[in-house]
Amino acid sequence: MDALMSLYADDIVYYDVIAPLQFIGADEVRRNFVRWFDEYDGGIGLETQDQRVAVSGDVAFAHMLHLDSGTRRNGLELAVWVHSTVCLRHINNHWLITHEHISIPHDPNDWTAVVDATP
């Protein structure tokens, strides 16, 4: 967990697909990651596709698709594609994530999550 959190700025703003939707600060983001990891029985698969990165000076952003997969503690085996946008700043000779936004595609007819979409 410490290695993961070393990638994030102390004042990170993180938007996720679960309530409360917004997590502000490294402590809240850490708790959200612990919650996410605890949902799984074993490892979590995370495949990244279509990653694009743009950098200008001390600011960068990237967007990509992630396939989040694994067996949940309730026995459900699930693989879900999510969208991810990450914004970074070069601070004290390190690139740190200052903003991250994760989303799941939705059906426009009834706003239900579409968990079987593929790129």
Image (tube, helix red, strand yellow):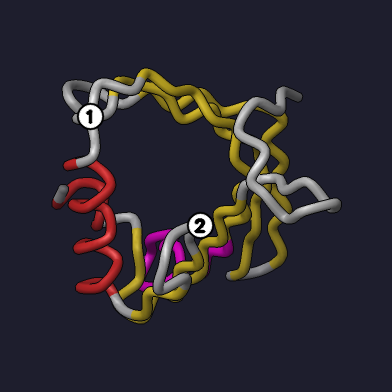
Based on the picture, tell me whether residue 31 belongs to the magenta stretch: no
* Span shown in magenta: 87-97
Crowding around mark 1 (Cα neighbors within 10 Å: few <14, some 14 to 19, many 20+) is few
Q: Earlier in the sequence, mark 2 or mark 1?
A: 2
Task: Determine which residue is flagged by label 2.
Answer: 17
Residue type, numbered disc 1: Asn
Considering the numbered disc 2 on the image, is that residue within a helix, a strand or a loop? loop
Q: Which residue is mark 1?
A: 74
Q: Quadrant of residue 30?
A: bottom left
Residue 90 covered by magenta stretch = yes
Q: Residues within 10 Å of mark 2 (few under 14, many from 20)?
A: few
Foreground pick, 69 / 116: 116
* Residue positioned most to the right: 109
Q: Amino acid at mark 2?
A: Val
Which-is-in-front pick, marks 2 and 1? 1
Q: Are marks 2 and 1 in contact (CB under 8 Å)?
A: no
**Going by the image, does 91 lie left or right of 4?**
right
Q: What is the secondary structure assignment of the residue under circle 1?
A: loop
Q: Which residue appears at 49% of the width and 23% of the height?
A: 79
Q: Residue at x 65, y 58 (%)?
A: 61
Is 24 rendered above or below residue 18? below
